[in-house]
């Protein structure tokens, strides 16, 4: 974790390590690693839940602001071939006064080596990419992009995860309910060890799941992200270039992105 954090120290939208030190535990073999890092008072999960408690929709301008910074942080990681492997609302720290967001918790992060296999039982279940469910061990940074899409959908749904499976396999059923079954071509797009038999499911579609006022360009972006084939998902850089984020850079809208 420290090694990864040192590699991305002072990168935009990533929590920065200040120092680390070890302290002894109660027995001679117990040693605790302590990490001193940036402090941000809340996270996206808790911030969104405040709106859920008030039974209010989550403002689209915040979805734009937080999503853009999340993708920018992922861009910083992915260009160094670092995959986070646990992107979720709780791991997106937030300064609720300024709107600044930083990715945290690098306990599952890894620098990818194409010659090396990776553990597939990784990522929190609701945000787990389909190739991981199938046991893929040669995955790419595209697994983080899938998780990021889940975070965006959860903001739109005011704190309710879009895919809420109660087991590893059931998670795939929950995904298929929304986007349909994977095709043979999808399954050939990544190496995997598991065969999961599923009934043919008639998907509901993202448009019906998400709030009626969800911008069409955001639905289009999520449609691209929620692809079974990892190579078809946009990169973090491509996500940043989506027109959904254009409003953040219009001067006349500057006052809109101030936090309450």
Image (spheres, rainbow, N blue to C red):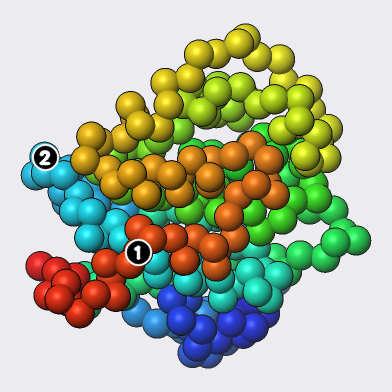
Where residue 192 sits, quadrant-wise, is top right
Which image quadrant: the C terminus? bottom left
Residue contact between numbered discs 2 and 1, judged by CB atoms under 8 Å: no
Which residue is at the far top? 199
* Residue beneath the point at 60% across and 72% down: 77
Q: Secondary structure at mark 1?
A: helix
Q: Mark 1 or mark 2, which is nearer the start of the sequence?
A: 2
The answer to whether residue 23 is seen in the rendering is no
* Residue beneath the point at 20% across and 49% down: 58
Work out whether residue 86 or residue 59 is closer to the camera in this orientation and state it: 59
Say whether residue 95 is left or right of residue 245. Answer: left
Q: Which residue is mark 1?
A: 245
Q: Position of residue 212 (x, y in %)?
A: 23, 34
* Residue beneath the point at 62% across and 9% down: 199
Look at the picture and state if 171 lies above or below 48: above
Q: Which residue is mark 2?
A: 55
Which residue is at the far right? 115
Q: Position of residue 211 (x, y in %)?
A: 25, 36
How packed mark 1 is, by other alpha carbons closer than 10 Å (few <14, some 14-19, many 20 or more), is some
CA distance for labels 2 and 1? 26 Å
Look at the picture and state if 231 lies above or below 181: below
Marker disc for residue 5: none
Work out whether residue 186 or residue 251 is closer to the camera in this orientation and state it: 251
* Residue beneath the point at 76% across and 65% down: 112
Say whether residue 44 is left or right of residue 169. Answer: left
Say whether residue 78 is left or right of residue 16. Answer: right
The answer to whether residue 35 is seen in the rendering is yes
Work out whether residue 85 or residue 212 is closer to the camera in this orientation and state it: 212
Q: Position of residue 166 (x, y in %)?
A: 50, 26
How packed mark 2 is, by other alpha carbons closer than 10 Å (few <14, some 14-19, many 20 or more), is few
Q: Secondary structure at mark 2?
A: loop
Which image quadrant: the N terminus? bottom right
């Amino acid at each position: 974790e420290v090694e990864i954090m040192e590699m991305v120290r002072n990168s935009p939208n990533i929590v920065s390590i200040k120092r680390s030190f070890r302290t002894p535990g109660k027995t001679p073999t117990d040693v605790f690693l302590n990490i001193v890092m940036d402090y941000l008072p809340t996270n996206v999960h808790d911030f969104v839940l405040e709106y859920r408690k008030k039974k209010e929709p989550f403002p689209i301008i915040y979805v734009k602001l937080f999503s853009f910074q999340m993708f920018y942080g992922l861009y910083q990681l992915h260009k160094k071939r670092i995959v986070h492997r646990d992107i979720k609302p709780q791991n997106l720290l937030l300064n609720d006064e300024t709107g600044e967001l930083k990715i945290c918790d690098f306990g599952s992060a890894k620098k990818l080596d194409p010659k090396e296999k990776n553990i597939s039982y990784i990522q929190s279940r609701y945000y787990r990419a389909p190739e991981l469910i199938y046991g893929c061990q040669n995955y790419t940074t595209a697994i983080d992009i899938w998780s990021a899409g889940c975070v965006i959908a959860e903001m739109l749904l005011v704190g309710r995860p879009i895919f809420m499976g109660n087991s590893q396999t059931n998670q795939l059923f929950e995904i298929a309910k929304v986007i349909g079954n994977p095709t043979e071509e999808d399954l050939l797009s990544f190496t995997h060890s598991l065969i999961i038999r599923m009934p043919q499911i008639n998907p509901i579609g993202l448009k019906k799941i998400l709030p009626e006022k969800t911008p069409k360009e955001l639905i289009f972006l999520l449609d691209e992200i929620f692809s079974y084939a990892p190579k078809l998902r946009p990169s973090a850089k491509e996500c940043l270039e989506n027109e959904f984020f254009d409003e953040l850079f219009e001067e006349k809208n500057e006052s809109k992105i101030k936090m309450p």
